[in-house]
Structure formats: structure tokens, C-alpha cells
Image (tube, rainbow, N blue to C red):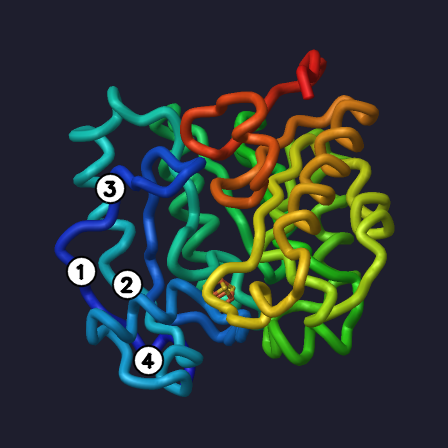
Amino acid sequence: MSTEKMAIRRKSLLYKTAVEYGDYTINHVEGCSHGCLYPCYAMMMARRFGKVKSYEEWLRPKIVSNAIDLLKKEIPRHRDKIKFVHLCFSTDPFMYGHETITNLSFELVSLLNESGIKCTSLTKGILPIKLAQLSDQNEFGITLISLNEDFRKEYEPFASPYKDRIESLYRLHKKGIKTWVSIEPYPTPNIIDQDFGSILKAISFVDKIIFGRLNYNPMVSQYPSYKDFYDSLSREVIEHCIRNNQEWHIKNGTMYGWSKKIGHPDDSISAGKGFDSRI
Ligand code: SF4
């Protein structure tokens, strides 16, 4: 069934999130056809709270049909408090093969920008080049945890191929748009043994990298030295970003030894360009 026919209505859309690197957010779609099997935290929550009953239902996204009207009403109420709006934490705004969702996301970002609100966005789909027509304050990102298509087909079965995903990000970068990559949820070598450096190399053009461990998967703690593994990759990300003048953010619970060494209060760490590393 097409996404146009699968629609829901909501009473509100724009809200302040407690997610680590978020501020305000909107989730204008319920479900996600990418069907990630790491597992997907958004799907776990949707099932726990009875929004979807099964994986199959999660795979059939439902658009929030009154999203534009809601946002028009809610922007004036929140505008003064908003630093930026992120699309999305519990679905994918540029879902692969879903033009209706991509177009709606574009309209919502336009609407926010018209009110002077910056947007950030993260996808495992394809970022449309027309995003470059919008505010140059926006930041568009992709998730990238591997370059191996066999792994992608197993763990992100209906998301976009990695090569196409990176190319769409690169096209926006070439248009002068700020780009970023979320290397999260990064798997341990007993899930896939891969060259981390080649992933960093493939995204050397981006402005910012976020790195985070894989959660909710028992295979991670079965890997004997997974804490050292994540510590070591966190260090590699930071060193890479300092060398390449990129911003970085290491997510909560990813650096086991380090955050204690530097006494960071919330176990995450980030820095802007030109950061003078104490580590
Ligand atoms: S893209 Fe995100 S929301 Fe969609 S299934 Fe994958 S992890 Fe879940």
C-alpha cells in the first residue's frame, strides 16, 4: 500500500527532546521501511507503547497527514526557545524509495527555515539535491557504519546502498551545505570485521562525525574486549577529526576508559574544529 493511503493524524508535532545531541524535533512519519535489524530502538519503543504490533507493520510507514498544519500552528509558540529542529529521532525523513515522505520532509524544513529556524537531519536514504536551495544554516547527515553491501543488506535491508548514500551527501557538500555522518550504532568485530579507517576515509569531506557503540545487541558484550575496542575507535575518530579539522561527538557510553580519565560528567564528549585535545 502506498504511503499516501497509510496516514495518521496527530495532535502535536514539535517537541523538545532529551536525546543527547538534540534540541527540538519532529517525527512526521510513524514506522520506517528501512527495517534495520541492529535492532532499531525506535521500533522497539513503538512496539512497547503499542503504536505498531509487528516488524511487518513497522515497515509500512504512515505519514502524519496534518504535519504541515500542526507545524504552522506550533512554530510561533516555540520559536524563541528553539536552537534547531532535528528530523528525525524515531523514523527516517528521507526514506529510500518514498518520494512522498521525502517531499513532506522538504516542505517541513522549508517551513521551519522560513521562520528562521535551522534544521538538522539524519537519514539512511538519499538526500535530495534540492535541499541545497534551503537555508545554508541547515546540516544534513547520513548514517554510515560500514561500506560492505552484504552487511547493509543483512542489517539495514531496505535502506539505500552505501555508495549512493555517500554520493548524495557529497553532492550537498559540493553545494556548500554543512554535512555530517553518524557512525552509529557501530558493530563489534564478531558481527563484522572491517577496516574502520576506510569508513573514515570515505567521509573525509564532511564537517562533523558522531560516533557511538551498538546497544541492545547481546553480541557486543560477547566480544571479549568490546570496551577496549570502542575506546580505541573513539580515539581514532577524535584523532582523525583533529587532523582533518572536523567537529566530532562521541556518544554516551562509548568511551569506557577515557571519559573517566578526563572526568567528563555525562560520559559523552565533543568538540569543534581546532579543538586542542587534552587526551
Ligand atoms: S532508519 Fe532508523 S528508524 Fe528506520 S529502521 Fe533504521 S534505525 Fe529504525
Mark 1 closeness class: few <14, some 14–19, many ≥20 residues within 10 Å: few
Residue drawn at 69 percent across, 31 percent down: 207
Label 2 close to label 4 by CB (< 8 Å): no
- Residue depicted at x 60% and y 69%: 222
Kindly identify which residue carries mark 4: 5
Dot 2 or dot 4: first in sequence order is: 4
Q: Is 106 left, or right, of 201 in this rendering?
A: left
Could you say whether the residue bearing mark 2 is in a helix, strand or loop?
A: strand
Mark 3 to mark 4: distance in Å? 26 Å
Q: How many marks?
A: 4
In the rendering, which numbered label is found on residue 15?
Answer: 3
Mark 2 CB in 8 Å range of ligand 1? Answer: no
Check disc 3 and give the amino acid type.
Answer: Tyr
Q: Residue at x 28, y 78 (%)?
A: 52
Mark 1 or mark 2, which has the lower sequence index?
Answer: 1
Badge nearest the viewer, 1 or 4: 1
Residue holding disc 2: 64
Label 2, residues with CA under 10 Å away: few <14, some 14-19, many ≥20: many
Q: Nearer the viewer, mark 2 or mark 4?
A: 2
Residue 28 sits above or below residue 34 on the image: above
Label 1 sits on what residue type? Answer: Arg
Dot 1 and dot 2 residues touching (CB under 8 Å): yes
Kind of residue sitting beneath label 2:
Val
Residue 177 percent across, percent down from the top left: 66, 32
Question: CA–CA distance between discs 1 and 3?
Answer: 13 Å
Pointer 3 or 4: first along the chain: 4
* Quadrant in which the N terminus is drawn: bottom left
Spatial separation of the CA atoms under disc 1 and disc 2? 7 Å
SS at badge 4: loop
**Nearest to N terminus: mark 1 or mark 4:** 4
Which residue has dot 1 on it? 10
Q: Work out whether residue 176 or residue 207 is closer to the camera in this orientation and state it.
A: 207
